[in-house]
Amino acid sequence: MQSANALFKLFYFLTFCISFAFSLNSDGLSLLALKAAIFQDPNRALISWSELHATPCSWAGITCDRAHRSVISISLPSKNLTGYIPSEIGALSFLASLDLSQNFFSGPLPQQITTLQNLVHLDISSNNFNGSLPEGLSNLTHLAGTLNLSYNAFVGEIPASFGQFPVMVSLDLQHNNLTGKIPQVGSLLNQGPTAFSGNPYLCGFPLSTPCTVPEAQNPRFFENPQKPGGNGGLVDSRKINGGSVTVSVISGVSLVVGVVVVSVWVIRKKWKVEQKLGKENVSREVAVGMGMGGEEGKKGKFVVIDEGFGLELEDLLRASAYVLGKSRSGIVYRVVVGGGKGVGSAVTAPVVVAVRRLSEGDVTWRFKEFEAEVEAIGKVKHPNIVGLRAYYYASDEKLLISDFIRNGSLFNALHGGPGNSMPPLSWAERLRIIQETARSLVHIHECSPRKYVHGSIKSSKILLDDDFKPYLSGFGLSRLVPGVSKSANVALSRKPNLVSPKTSVSSNIKCMAPEARNAGARINQKCDVYSFGILVMEILTGRLPDNDGKEGLENLVRRVFREERPLSEIIDPALLHEARAKKQVVATFHVSLNCTEQDPELRPKMRTVSDNLDRIKLQ
């Protein structure tokens, strides 16, 4: 009798479990197979993956199509997962995005991954995958952006079928153990050298390594290359022995607090602007207030941020000032202080600074709030960012004093402008400008937990010195004058006189990411990435972002690459004689195409963009 009861309870338990298993849809069962293939999950990233649910749509890292409740995205980057990809992955027929980067997956890629016909985004970089590259990956005809297989241990030759990838797909095979000659077929001919770097036994175009018989036929095997860490640095290769992995878990939130406030003089002043013979000379009246109990902010404060800045407000008010330019954020003056004979009849050089007079925008700033914002901006220092030296605050006037960069803007260097007699920029100068601007933008994005955004990347914001070193200007204006971050359609239509003659409303709009063009849109770092991509295209083609009112520049470049048309159709004619630079130019174009993906999630971070650009070397 007892044995019968035990059998009945066992039968009831099994029936209960089976009913739960069958309540989970087929996509959920495929994901449970993936979970079973992961034998180390130290961060408990998959704890929500349970067979008790009807669908996997609420699981961490999973996104579903609302209509069919089918899995369309698996996003598990940097989770310290150890395991392999099971063949059941091929059953996720609606899967559009698979991101397993920065983990410890190993083994070969299952052939079933080549059946995911709806896959658009595939990133398995920085793992320990090995074996040969599946030829059938070329069957994934909907791929876009970057197919990222970098920093693994794949071996063997690159399949010729990879030439069947659409021209718009950037292939990233760098830092594997691949060998042999790069197939000279199809879209592989359009890939830059960056796609194949870090594979010492690969040879042939676009690499500078010529092919010899031993290199092409004798594969070499060596340890897995180092993988880039999540912050763009390098982390040591880690070996999996007996299923044990050493994991470093970083917990907690780091807070950056405190702003150093230096209050100097209490001065009341007023600037009056008068225009004469095309120049605007500025006359000022200054009244000194001693703080008679009035509201703070009406008295005016001049604050020096850079300790090496030796000028006082009185020096600036006595100096000659000339208008450099106008924008929605205000007016910029070139202010020349001093000069002439000094002690012992020695000639002293004048000090030249740029003074930006901020427009009021949509926000009325209290002094403490304005002070905190400007001090934070002043702490962002980089060799390629215009340095903020001091500021002035009053209730009716706000000034930013920064370094003056004397050789004009990149816009003028590319398209001409008043007093511009410079010869066309060479390829070496353009590549340097692109690379160093990218580094400055990386610094802005990574220097603070606040995830700063520039918000207005375009050629007029890149200033050049006498050596054509670029300086990124305008950082922080989108916060100090919030009105400038609104839709370009709205802001520019209100103040058309602030648009320079050679630019246009549509050109400014084309610099902005699609998701940032609507009123009230929130600007984020991926918007900066898009604008940087447009900037790179502008530098390479010498064309305005709106392509003089014709097809937009981004659309033009994509069409030329998609149709595999000659590069001479879009490249700046001034670069046509530099034939030796063709491979570097093509590689740079591919970086810009990645930056300008319509889907923000497909755009790389600026750290990745900068690293890829730095691998493009002059020859």
Image (cartoon, helix red, strand yellow):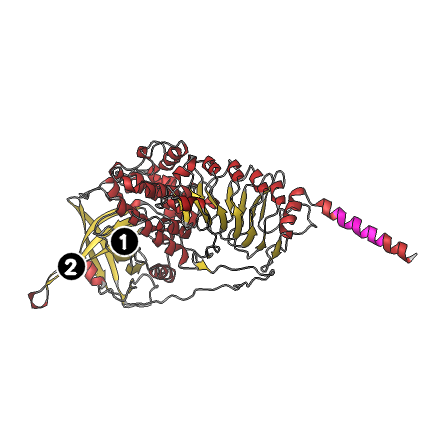
Residue 478 appears in the rendering: yes
Front in this rendered view, residue 172 or 107: 107
Residue 304, horizontal then vertical, whole percent? 28, 64
246 on left or right of 189? right
Q: Amino acid at mark 2?
A: Pro
Dot 1: few (<14), some (14–19), or many (≥20) neighbours within 10 Å? many
369 on left or right of 61? left
Q: Secondary structure at mark 2?
A: loop
Whether 13 is among the magenta residues is yes
Residue 277 quadrant: top left
Tell me the CA gap for discs 2 and 1. 19 Å
Count of numbered badges drawn on the protein: 2
Whether 619 is among the magenta residues is no
Q: Which quarter of the rendered picture does the N terminus lie within?
A: bottom right
Q: Residue furthest toward the left?
A: 345
Front in this rendered view, residue 90 or 358: 90
Front in this rendered view, residue 107 or 85: 107
Q: Main secondary structure of the magenta part?
A: helix
Residue 551, horizontal then vertical, whole percent? 36, 32
* Mark before the other along the chain sequence, 2 or 1: 2
Q: Secondary structure at mark 1?
A: strand
Instruction: Write down the region rendered in magenta.
Output: 8-19
Residue 36, horizontal then vertical, whole percent? 65, 52
In the rendered view, tell whether residue 488 sits above or below residue 368: above
> Which residue is located at x 60 percent, y 41 percent?
90
The residue labelled by disc 1 is 356
Dot 2: few (<14), some (14–19), or many (≥20) neighbours within 10 Å? few
In the rendered view, tell whether residue 544 sits above or below residue 465: above
Residue 397 appears in the rendering: no
The residue labelled by disc 2 is 350
Q: Amino acid at mark 1?
A: Arg
Residue 175, horizontal then vertical, whole percent? 44, 51
